[in-house]
Every structure is written in C-alpha cells, then in structure tokens.
Amino acid sequence: MTTTFSRDIYFSFFMFTADLRPDDEAYSRTLIEHCRALKDMGYAGFDVHIAPQPVGGDHAQEVASYVGLKNRFDLAGVGDVPFTTNVGTTQRFDITSPYREQRAQALAYLKSRVDITAIMGGDAAIMSGPFLYPYGVFPVTDDGEPIWSDALQDLMAQRYVTARSSFAELVEHAVTKNVTLAIEPVKSWETPGPNMVSEVLDFLDSFESRPAGVALDTAQVVMESQGPQSFRRNVARASAQHRLHSVHVSAPDRGAVGDAWIPWDLLLRELEPVFRGPYLVEVFNAIPPFDSSMRMSRRRFWRPGEDDPTPYGSAYDVAATALATLQKQLAAAAQYA
C-alpha cells in the first residue's frame, strides 16, 4: 500500500546492516530490494550508516565506491528517494584527541563522510550520529582505571574544547557540500558523552557553528534525559537557534516501535510546532555488530531476501507497523502544529 500522509517519514537501514558494502554489487541488489519494499509501504526516504573504513584505507577511493553505489541505486530506479546518513567517530578517528596528528586524521575521515553524505543525499542532505566524541570509547587513567562521575565530566569538557577548531573546519566543509550536521547525544551506558541534548547545544554555543545542530532521538531522551521540563527547554532552545535538524523515533529497547514505551503526547506536543524535517524511524535489529555492542538479548527480526523466515517477526512487518504507528500519532498531534 502507498500512504497519502503529508509528513515525510524515513526508515533507518540499521534494521538490515551497519555496512552498505558499496563495492559489493550483489549486496547492492539486496539493498535495492529493501528500498523498493519500504518505498512501497510509504516511506519517503532512508537513513544509512557509513561504516568506518579498515586501517590504512584510502578516503578518496572509499568516496568513489559510494559514487558507484549511488549510480546502481539510480539505475534501479530508487536513486530519487532521499538518503540521510549516520556517522560515528572511532578511537582511531577522534577529533577530541589531545594529539594534533590524530585530530587531523579524524577531520579527514569526517570530511570524507560529509562527501559520502552529499553523494547519497544530494542537495540539503543530513549527516547525523555520534561524531563528536568516539562512540563507545570509555576513557581510563594511565593505570587502566575507568574514569567516572566528576572526573569524567571534567575530562569530557576538556575534550570538547580541544575539538572546537577541527569541528569548525568540518562545519565549513559541510556548508560547501550542502550537508547539514546533526550531532546525536547517546545514553551513558553506550558512550561517555555527549549524553544529552543540552550537552550538544552547549558545545555548539561555544563557537560560531550555526549550520550545525542536534539530532534528537526519542530513545535517548527517555533513557538519559533530566525530565519533561528539561526536554521542553532543550527543544525550545534548539528550535530558537535553528539547530533542531533531525528527530529519530526509536523505542527505548531500540526494537519495534509499534508497541513501545514512547511518550508520544509529551514528545510531539513540543516537536510538532517547531520541527519541519522528516521523522526517522530507527530500529536496531539484533544483528552484528549491534547485538554485541548494544548487548541485545531479544530475537532477530528476519530480513526478507537475507534470512530464513522465523516466527519472531519480519523486518518488513516491523517497519510497516512502525510507519502506521507514527502516522497515527502525528495525526493525533496535528492539533499542536
């Protein structure tokens, strides 16, 4: 079925993969079939993860491989659908590093991700994700002891200051490519920071970075926020600064959205009057590397064309239910817009 709902809703390919394997033409055909099925459901666009390259990889060659992938999408008739990207930094590519050479490597890496986003998304593309501090890299002392609480907050504040000049250069590069940057805060058990929308906004307030903004994720807000009043203040603050660039709709367990602990009325009451971008449905399937990195104990949703059917739910059925649920909630929230 094809929806006539007026608000664009995108779907994240975290349901299927964390690596598009752009040089693998056979796998591209699988991705194209997923695009067609989701487009037929009524999804208006897709979010794809740009995987980190192997050590010693060439950025220019990698960017060229995504040109080839996008060409295959175009030839298959799905290239007209908008794409956004999800990007994370790594321990190797860290723009908060105290070492100048490492920051330079990280900046080159992130610029290549902006270039790939421009290729996949065209004009006014969005690159979101935890690309300020390396995702999942918890700092330790010289003696190998974990750093927590006040000491961790002081360390993160120092790392954010160190990142300013590199991030400012990244913003300038993104402007030349018509790519909008949206830093996503992620909950504290996944990464040491930034964990809250306010922390991202504080970082962006520390220098002139108007084209860059924040990605708000409903799962992160529910699990890591300071409460409804803080959420209202942060949405108002980001909106007033024109920095609310992306909204991810995700269940707290990062699974099916259809019947999830999402406070729809509270969230949409604040978002609908000010947010005009597409909503992104984000479901993390229990596939590598998410199953281990996010400690998933739930069953995998089987992926048509990739997995044998199981009784535990099809990825397409989960996607269709999520779309219908979000459409219903947005229709109910129309009074707030």
Image: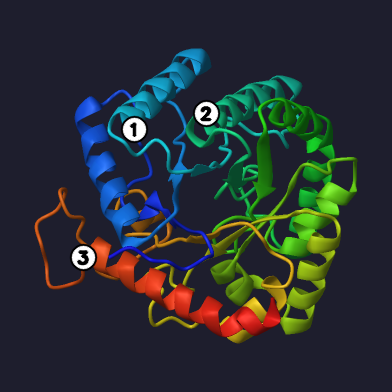
Kind of residue sitting beneath label 1: Phe
Helix, strand, or loop for circle 2?
helix
Mark 1 and mark 2 in contact (Cβ < 8 Å)? no
Disc 1: which residue: 73
Kind of residue sitting beneath label 3: Ser
| Label 3 neighbour load within 10 Å: few <14, some 14-19, many 20+ | some
- When asked about the image quadrant of residue 220, the answer is bottom right
Mark 3 and mark 2 in contact (Cβ < 8 Å)? no
Kind of residue sitting beneath label 2: Ile
- When asked about the image quadrant of residue 132, the answer is top right
Residue 330, position as x, y percentages in the image: 54, 76
Viewer-nearest of labels 1 and 3?
1
| Label 1 neighbour load within 10 Å: few <14, some 14-19, many 20+ | many
Taking the image as shown, residue 34 lies to the left or right of residue 251, namely left
Disc 2: which residue: 116
Viewer-nearest of labels 2 and 1?
1
Residue at 40% x, 58% y: name it: 43
